[in-house]
Image (cartoon, rainbow, N blue to C red):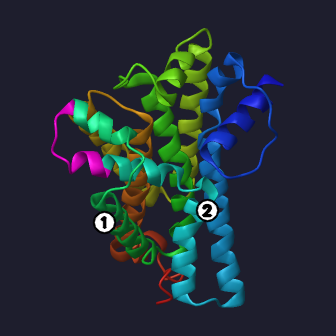
Amino acid sequence: MSWLKALCIAFSLYSRIPVPNFEWKDRELRLHMVFFPWIGAVIGALLFGWLKLTEALHIGSIAYVLIGVAIPLLVTGGFHADGYMDCMDAFRSYKDRDEKLRILKDPHVGAFAVLMLVVLLLIYGGAYSQIKAAFIPVLAGGFFLSRTLSALAVMFFPAAKKDGMLYSFSRSAHGEKWKLVTLLTFINLAICFAFMLIMNPAAGALSALAAGLCFLYYHYKSKKEFGGITGDTAGFFVCICETAIAFSLAGCSFLFLEFLNGTDNGRACSGAL
């Protein structure tokens, strides 16, 4: 029952998917990060289903791309985008560390947050529009991968503050269930990596490399700007990681499709080919 409750906590916190309400206890909180990546699995399944629906119904390319970009936002309720926007306001303030941390807690949205979110969505949408159908399963796995890496960051990266949601979960993860949670998270990582490689070895490896580089950048940037990670920086990482994966797959589609598959066996998301 604790595992089921931990699953519900993860989906309640990080998605808009309805789950039963109940009192949260420390035991379930210690376990919930194990299930965080599975929200990405839901997003990936919906994207793949959307691809198949557009192919069956001959839905236009613009609708395909715009709704495809919207699906992760609809599933999460913009949870990670909110953290990304807060980080953009803090980064662009060019203030000292304490002031940047204060900006993260400010509920108001600054101009830089809006502008940078628009830029991110344009880059992601542009990359997504160029990904061949054959590579969409790899992209689907990327939503699982970004959340698995985010969970590992909570476990291993220093926290910027001694309060807040991320810090409390970090302390919970370092309790008596630390070894089990860590083991299961690495199992999640192995499953995701294996899935992406099976779907397409070269594209899967390139996507994993892009995600790994984002992970290293996340550690450097969060420590430099804030002294560690927060809940907002976790959202920032998920957003840039998924964009980097999409961008790497767009490049793979453009440069290597004929070499990898021997034939043009899928239409691009843009409707070309």
Q: Is residue 107 left or right of residue 17?
A: left
Disc 2 versus disc 1: distance between alpha carbons? Answer: 20 Å
* Mark 1 Cα shell of 10 Å, populated few (<14), some (14-19), many (≥20): few
- What quarter of the picture does the N terminus occupy? top right
Residue drawn at point x = 56 percent, y = 45 percent: 192
x and y percent of residue 241 in the render?
A: 40, 51
| Res. 169 in view | yes
Q: How many marks do you count on the picture?
A: 2
In primary-sequence order, the first of circles 2 and 1 is: 2
Residue 63, quarter of picture: bottom right
Mark number for residue 74?
A: 2
Residue drawn at point x = 42 percent, y = 53 percent: 239
* Mark 2 Cα shell of 10 Å, populated few (<14), some (14-19), many (≥20): some
x and y percent of residue 6 in the render?
A: 72, 30
Residue type at mark 1: give it.
Answer: Leu
Q: Is residue 189 left or right of residue 227?
A: right
Q: Nearer the viewer, residue 103 or 261?
A: 103
- From the image, tell me which residue sits under label 1: 115
Mark number for residue 258?
A: none
Q: Nearer the viewer, residue 136 or 181?
A: 181
User: Label 2's element?
Assistant: helix
Rendered view: 7 above or below 161: below
x and y percent of residue 244 in the render?
A: 36, 57
Contact between labelled residues 1 and 2, with CB atoms less than 8 Å apart: no
Query: Which residues, given as a range, are shown in magenta?
Result: 88-97
Of badges 2 and 1, nearer the viewer stands: 1
Rendered view: 94 above or below 128: above
User: Label 1's element?
Assistant: helix
Q: Nearer the viewer, residue 82 or 17?
A: 82
Rendered view: 28 above or below 115: above
